[in-house]
Amino acid sequence: MGRNPRRDLVAGLTVAVVALPLALGFGVSSGLGAQAGLATAVVAGAVAAVFGGSNLQVSGPTGAMTVVLLPIVARHGPGGVLMVGLIAGLIVVGLAVARAGRYMAYIPASVVEGFTLGIALVIGLQQVPNALGVPKPEGDRVLEVTWRAVEAFAGAPDWTAAGLAGGVAAVMLIGARLKPTVPFSIIAVIGATLVAQLFRLDDATPIGTLPAGLPAPSLGFVDLSQLGSLIAPAMAVAALAALESLLSAQVADGMTVGQKHDPDRELFGQGLANLAAPLFGGVPATGAIARTAVNVRTGASSRLSALTHAAVLAVIVFAAAPLVSRIPLAALAGVLLATAVRMVEVGSLRAMARATRSDAVVLVLTAVATLALDLVYAVVIGFVVAGGLALRAVAKQARLAEVDFRADLPGEHGEEEHALLAEHIVAYRIDGPLFFAAAHRFLLELSEVADVHVVILRMSRVTTVDATGALVLKDAVEKLNRRGIAVMTSGVRPEQRQALEAVGALDLLRLDGREFATTPEAIAAARAHLHGAGVVLPPPRQKVHPGLAEEPRTPFTEESRPQSSQESLR
């Protein structure tokens, strides 16, 4: 933090100016009031900056967390939300201890984009009541609440609040295009507040009285009787806190050169932040992508900027609470409406939708589920659907292809002998994964093998085998054996043996000595098997030393076939 403190201090001050209206707005949207948003920004912002795994991350209340908290407030009240924050903090710390941060890389980009689009839609719709200046209708379904608010406004329209909200949003969106480095959010909020005060706009409802300072740490909200019913919401909050924080840290790394966050330490810092914030009346917090991006763009290079952001907000809480309490709710609604619009990256959505049909389906499904259900269900649904489509694509790569075995046939043979062997031996190469998603198609193809005497399975190109694939292989071998077809394998990899041995597939092959390391060995054994059955010529003799006489070769005829050959064929 001592390398370039001036730039970090300036960056921290800039982020604080941007974060102030967002913290107030998200506090109001969560249902706990503007003071809860400020307490979260100060306490969680400072704790996460000290103990987190990113030098550039800025933490605090976010729109995504607000979406999850609204139903919790409706069902359990403010005390339930604070209790959920404590439990979620413990869960996130546990994830850090379990080193779960590395698994962030497995979340598909289409799920993340759909998740972000859905959050933006929910945040925007949540602001409709305040933007229209009507009381917020009862309910925790955002579409239903929005519709009722529009109906209430249509019954008695008053454009004062709508004008303030629209003006703030327009200033922010237009100003960001013209001068991206200027904090137009605070300028627009100050302007809306002055207009409401100067013209005494009675319909511009202020956010309300704020306490002059942070409350002392307290556990008075803890109600152990609610603990059982709060576990599921706390797990949802913890999952979101971990997901959004690691996403934000990745964004910060991508915007800089030489910065690399520690995902497990970042989870640890976010867990401690969520343990600390409820003690001061704050809501659960995450890493904030918008504030982190501002922090990076304004030249931050260390944790000093995030600490400065928290300190500046603390000074505002202690010194300017009466002024902040006069900000109209409609102005904060405008800030959040503009924030929701800026969250949607049209270029990224268009690229994702054009990438593959599966990506487009997952993106739309995740966004719709976020809007219609809730955020955690949406992520789970998107992840499951993306995983299912990925498995389907991988399963299509598994192929069972008949191959010409003449190149691997040991000895010297003429065309007639090649043709004779091809009538009785067929070789198949298995490519790709032999697992549950592709195994049954493999069994169907293998069961349709024509009437031959030997099937050789070349398995050197099998990438993975699970229990289902091993069972299907065993079943296929047993069915072919019952038809009198001998099955031989070659090239089984060491990492595939555990699954094959566990279900008894290898034992079935070893019973008759039909597992081989290489394909030529398997072909030689297949030819010997046919010779023993009296079907083809005996194996060619190996070349002998020039000084030794070679035994005469006896032509094979039907009369010379051993009597036992008929039994072997049966």
Image: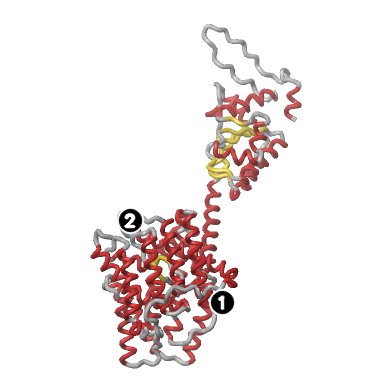
x, y (%) of residue 328?
38, 85
* Amino acid on which the number 2 mark rests in the picture: Gln
Q: Give the vertical position of 533 relative to 339 (above or below).
A: above
**Foreground: 30 or 185?**
30
**Foreground: 86 or 532?**
86
Q: Give the vertical position of 451 relative to 30 (above or below).
A: above
Q: CA distance from mark 2 to mark 1?
A: 42 Å
**Foreground: 553 or 483?**
483
State left or right for residue 224 relative to residue 63. right
Residue 300, by quadrant, is bottom left
State the residue position of label 1: 75
Q: Residue at x 32, y 76 (%)?
A: 315
Residue 451, by quadrant, is top right
x, y (%) of residue 60?
40, 69
Figure coloring: secondary structure
Quadrant, the N terminus: bottom left
State the residue position of label 2: 259
User: Does label 2 or label 1 sit earlier along the sequence?
Assistant: 1
State left or right for residue 121 relative to residue 514. left
Q: Secondary structure at mark 2?
A: loop
State left or right for residue 10 relative to residue 134. left
Quadrant, the C terminus: top right
Q: Residue at x 41, y 85 (%)?
A: 208
Residue 248: assigned label: none
Query: Can the viewer see residue 365 in this picture?
Result: no
The residue at the far top in this view is: 547
Q: Residues within 10 Å of mark 1 (few under 14, many from 20)?
A: few
